[in-house]
Amino acid sequence: MIDRRALFGTAAGAAAMTAFFRERAAFAKSPTDVELRGSIGRMERLGTLDLESQQDFTLGFRVWQARDMRRTSAMLLDQALVEQGIDPKASMTYAEMLKIAEANPQINLASRTWLSNQQVTWKTLQDYFHANADMYLAEMEAADKVGPGALELHPDMNVPEYTRHEIHIQPGGYVGDPFAGHIFHYGTNSFYISVLGHNEQDQIHKKVAAGMTTPADGKVKRILDMGCGCGQMTAALKERFPDAEVWGIDIGGPMVRYSHMRANDIGIGANFRQALAEETGFPDGYFDIVTSYIMHHEVPAEKTIEIINEAHRVTRPGGVYVPLDFATTGKLEAPPARLHAMWWDHRWNNEVWSVSYRSINFTDEIAKRGFKAIDGLKPLAPQFGERNFVRV
Amino acid sequence: MAKLKTDRPTYAVDAIPSDIKDAVFLGNPMLDNLVSSMIAMGTELWATKRRLKVVEALMAEKGVTNEMIEQFVPSEAQTAAWEADRDRFIDLTFGPLANPGTTGMSADFPKRGNGV
């Protein structure tokens, strides 16, 4: 077993971690808990050193790619525009931008390297979990039955086609691989570090949860996290509001299984349910806070409207609705460099619904449906829209 | 990888596969494959280097076992140094790919001082 105290240099850090692990040890762990190489903080180490190192490489490559390759691409795109007498800051359509960008081999090489690296990230993770499937499936089966948090799986429910895409080119997407939660959790660490910073200890989710808007009357008894993925935001909310009944829902059965297992493993009693955000199954006015963390750009615009209506139904009067996602204007025209980044994400990151999402002004759509914007509050993370609403 | 076969419940359903694996950016699939191969090679090479770093770090201590290697956790300073070395490694092996390239090939190549 790792001496975790040795991981943290300062006395204060060691004391904090000792307290953390004492708390964690209070929860009986399943005898089938798989933790081959221990944990660093709340992140279980990957099962082999080589796999950990492969992920370390693809993370570093992604950071380098986002910095150097994209900088070169942006420079060459600007250069090509100027050569054709086009102002690089002027808005244009996707078709106009692509005609110029895709004629440049270096820009195409940037796309190639990004894509190949992302494929290695997913393949190495999926290969490992599939090669050790029985052990990890047995771990989840055992974890399904224990708390402190609850788990609701609905294997016979209809899983709509729109949710079945391989978002981020993750093999099997959110619903199609038994280890979707494992693969997503480990693979997306590199997403965070190249944009917002480290998230191995849920730092980003904790920061967002710490800033979460609360109802004016201060009552927070129940919280809903829609599209919870691997449960990081749900867990962070339960930590901030330990006395509240906190639910994370996701259509991916493997996702909510992993979320449940992981939250319990770190001693957080959040609840998880396999459900669609547009059909949560909770009673009217049940929640004081309804939120979601970058879910909406993963669903078609018409589903976003349905989800807003469902959020209105399950939020109590005076409760707050704080869906976090990227800023949108409802206009698909933008300066070429920005447009290229959005296209890249849509086409090569297989963000199937991102263009649909950007085709509406998400904030305005919420305001049309029984919610009132709370003035003076900033987005909880960079690039997110200002969406702090109170249910009327 | 083929779909996982298991008798255990998986709670997975059929996904809609992306078409990304067939993408050709570089005009010739072989060039795309070459780049993919380079990145995979880099991944494996880095894994090897990182393992060696673990071994080297442990060699400073008494007795080296495989278990010790697997359980080794780098210090903050080691992690920072290794990350810096990783970035140097990436810059060395893949940096040329970020070169925009301005000199033409064959007939367009400028003549040197000796007229060749």
Image (spheres, rainbow, N blue to C red):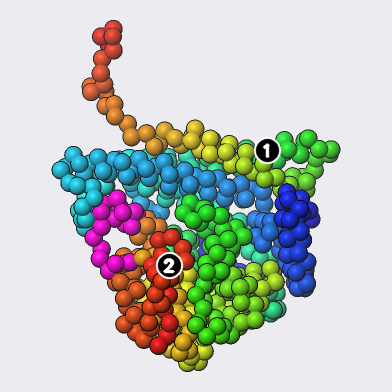
Q: Is residue A291 left or right of residue A48?
A: left
Local packing at callout 2 (Cα closer than 10 Å; few below 14, some 14-19, many 20+) is some
Which residue range is magenta in the image? Answer: A328-344
The location of residue A188, given as percent across then percent down, is: 52, 58
Q: What subunit carries mark 1?
A: B
Local packing at callout 1 (Cα closer than 10 Å; few below 14, some 14-19, many 20+) is some
Task: Indicate whether B115 appears above or below A17.
Answer: above
Point 73% across, 50% down: residue: A10
Q: Please name the residue that numbered disc 1 is placed on.
A: B53
Task: Indicate whether A352 appears above or below A344.
Answer: below
Point 39% across, 37% down: residue: B98
Farthest residue toward the right? B62
Dot 2 amino acid type: Lys
Q: Which circle marks residue A378 in the picture?
A: 2
Q: Is residue B99 left or right of residue A173?
A: left
Q: Which circle marks residue A320 in the picture?
A: none
Farthest residue toward the top? B114
Point 62% across, 38% down: residue: B81
Q: Is residue A328 left or right of residue B49?
A: left
Element under label 1? helix
